[in-house]
Image (spheres, grey):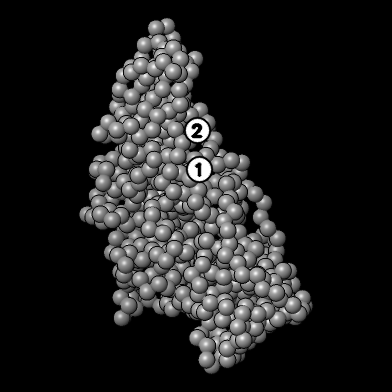
Amino acid sequence: MKRWLCLAATALAIAAVAGVLDAGGAGQAAAQSPAVSVFPIPGEVAAPPQSQLTFRGIPISQVGQVSVVGSVSGAHTGHWAADSDGNGGSFILDQPFSPGETVTVTTNLNIADQAGGATGGTYTFTVAHPAGGFPSLHWPPAGRVPGDIQTFHSRPDLLPVSTTVHNYGDWSSGDIFLSPQWGPIQDGPMILDPNGNLVWFDHLRGNESAADFRVQSYRGQPVLTWWEGTLDAGVGIGGNVIFNSAYQQIGQVKAAGGLRADLHEFEITPWNTALVISNYLIWWNATSVHGPAQQATLDSIVQEIDIPTGLVLFQWSSLDHVPLSYSYQRMPSSPHIPYDPYHINSVDVDRDNNLIVSMRNTWAAYKVNHTTGAIMWELGGRHSSFHLTPGTYWAFQHDVRVRAHNDQFITMFDDDAGPPKIHPASRAIKLQLDLTHMTARSIVAHHHSPDISSNFEGNYQQLPNGDDFVGWGQNPYFTEYDKSGRLILSGQMNDGNSSYRAYRFQWNAVPWNLPAVSAHTQGRRTTVWVSWNGATGVSSWRVYGGASPGAMHWLTRVSKRTFETAINVPAEAWVQVQALDSSGKVIKSSAATAVH
């Protein structure tokens, strides 16, 4: 993984011997303590061996004595680390738990009985049997065709996929955010202006791809966020990054407890924590769904991460809450082929701060209590809490979101294409939920013209002005519809490519680096090519030339046209270019560049 920062973790190291841990204080009687939520949850059935022991609800200085004993590994030592909000912390093991063992945690706390597995201040959980990791793979690159990539004289290192945009509306919805993942030469986060011109591209190296590239708010400031890593079995193995408006990395978020972050979600919450997904491959008894007693199975896990410290604040395991029988996924032909019964692909914060979790392979979304992890309702799937009115259906859905700060409206991308294929075309749909009578009905359905089917990926973004922006998953298309459902923008990447999600956002940026310049003289004329990767406020370019860097004179001023502007001037030995805003003010100047 590139560019990972070593962020300083706020940690309180406490001596811990013989399995008895003390985070300070004499300990409180359970009856006098506030309820404390713990993760892994009491009774958890498949905790990762490197799990952190998370305590939430009181400062760690008030935790008191804690004993951690594995039925095989014995008493555990480690150190305490405090959460950045002061409302909890985690015990970090010196050594991992043993696979399959039962762990008993004894405290003097009032442990919230999250799943019926706590007795007073004591609770237990079971450790999973890991079934290995994943190789570092990449999507097969798209086949090469003429014009499939963009090239630039001033930035020969950038080779993004070609795109086409037909804009029938206006510029008010902002720039377009994509993360091409099939090459054909380079992958990475990419910003286009409303007419499809490149604004910014950051190519990743090796087998790495990017996903879920968008603008979010962190500590009151707009930031760019995305996942980057490698892929296998339909899941990602990587981490997430946070960039500021100068395109400098200011943070990174990884899954905790020995897990790796999946590509499907990186959501910064209103309280500046991060929601991420991890898919953990374990050996599991699948006889309840007519599978083998030892089947390699993916447990989809949601974690809430404290961004400054990297500590777990909340953890939710699919295997703990959703039976295998709820899944529509077929059992693989071999116990060594990963069985993916759940496949979480989005996590959203509801208006009451509980979570909405989408599972592709159960065809359902679940409202999850953010404190206890209990399922509050199920939308769709085999055991829906809601009656779906006639014409309301979906399958293999992605990107389930609460809209208008009101859980009476839900949007999602309805893939429908399987396998097996359930309906002839994918759609972006909006549902209205009646939470009194527990009914759900479809009130908006956007189809691509012509119809297309997506086996995977896709999203539905509701824009601030009421427009709807749709990314069509494994297909290279993205579209925007106004409030009346009229198509006002259509675009696509070169055939054979896709972006996990596609978005539109307002974005203003001044890159940390300088404009890039290349210049070539032929006869009496010099052609100057200039670009500034990521700059959004450049209105025009002012060119200077001369016999040396110290003897420059003004040559011309031209409007910025696309990502790279070609400017013809009289033959010069050296050139320098200034980026000007709409008022003619200099934003930044390039370095003096020798003409070839």
Q: Amino acid at mark 1?
A: Gly
**Residue 258 location, x and y as percent?**
65, 63
Residue labelled with disc 2: 158
Instruction: In the rendered structure, find residue 188 and report the number of the disc placed on it.
Output: 1
> Which mark is on residue 530?
none
Task: Tell me the residue at 45%/44% (across/down).
Answer: 247
What residue occupies the far bottom of the structure in this picture? 31
Q: Of helix, strand and loop, which one carries label 2?
A: loop
**Tag count:** 2
Whichever of labels 1 and 2 marks the residue nearer the N terminus, that label is 2
Label 1 – label 2 distance at C-alpha: 10 Å
The residue lying toward the viewer, choosing from 299 and 415, is 299
Q: Amino acid at mark 2?
A: Leu
Label 1 SS: loop
| Quarter holding residue 269 | bottom left
**Percent from the top left, x then y, of residue 529?**
41, 23
The residue at the far top in this view is 523
47 lies above or below 565? below
Q: Which of 551 and 589 lies nearest the eye of the viewer?
A: 551
